Amino acid sequence: MVDLDTTCYLEGFRRFLISSTCRSFIPESYLHDPEVFPEKAGDQGSIYVEAVDKVDLKKIRDVTFVNARDILGIIYTSKSGNTKLKWRELRGRTGRLTGQASNNSLVNLSMARIISPDDVEAIIASQEGQGEEQAQEGAPQAQTEADVSQEQ
């Protein structure tokens, strides 16, 4: 797991949510509408959109698509539970993304253009390097928020 603390646009995080949860079955019209977001509840991952104005559109499989305006925050937990991210509005459609992400989620964050592919490679390489160093020292593997910030 990697600790993240970065700013990103709401649209980027929306793309991440779609690619992580419902890319294969989202209706085409919803895919291109910047006000439509997936929501999901339950043990197999969750997405909660906190917004001033939110209307349910359609439920497909375990995902409910909502039309949301004036979004204040989004909480995402992956199906495996290895990724837990929160997006909080800072100003307009820009917000702060914080939490922990798995390697798979790092790839999806890169595809959504929240972090660059070079950042993903650097983070994974530093994790592997730290793992080897700490395995030799017998310490547990971890990456701090400061390490991620320096790599970005």
Image (cartoon, helix red, strand yellow):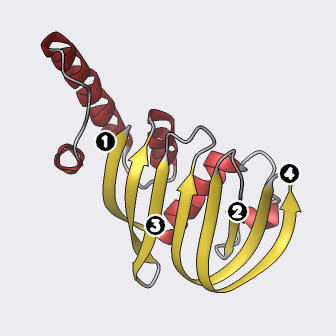
- Pointers 2 and 1 in contact (CB under 8 A)? no
- Compute the Cα span from label 4 to label 3: 24 Å
Indicate which disc, 1 or 3, sits on the residue closer to the N terminus.
3
Q: Which residue in the protein does label 3 denote? A: 87
Nearer the camera: disc 1 or disc 3? 3
Please state which amino acid type lies under the numbered disc 2. Answer: Pro
Please state which amino acid type lies under the numbered disc 1. Answer: Asp
Indicate which disc, 2 or 1, sits on the residue closer to the N terminus.
2
Residue 61: numbered disc: 4
Q: Position of residue 42 (x, y in %)?
A: 71, 53
Please state which amino acid type lies under the numbered disc 4. Answer: Arg
- Compute the Cα span from label 4 to label 2: 11 Å
- Compute the Cα span from label 3 to label 2: 14 Å
Q: Residue at x 70, y 63 (%)?
A: 39
Q: Residue at x 16, y 10 (%)?
A: 136
Query: Which quadrant holds the N terminus?
Result: top left
Indicate which disc, 4 or 3, sits on the residue closer to the N terminus.
4
With respect to residue 90, does 86 lie above or below?
above
Q: Which residue in the protein does label 2 denote? A: 38
- Compute the Cα span from label 2 to label 1: 26 Å
Indicate which disc, 3 or 2, sits on the residue closer to the N terminus.
2
Q: Helix, strand or loop at disc 1?
A: helix
Residue 119: numbered disc: 1
Q: Helix, strand or loop at disc 2?
A: strand
Q: Helix, strand or loop at disc 4?
A: loop
With respect to residue 142, does 3 lie above or below?
below
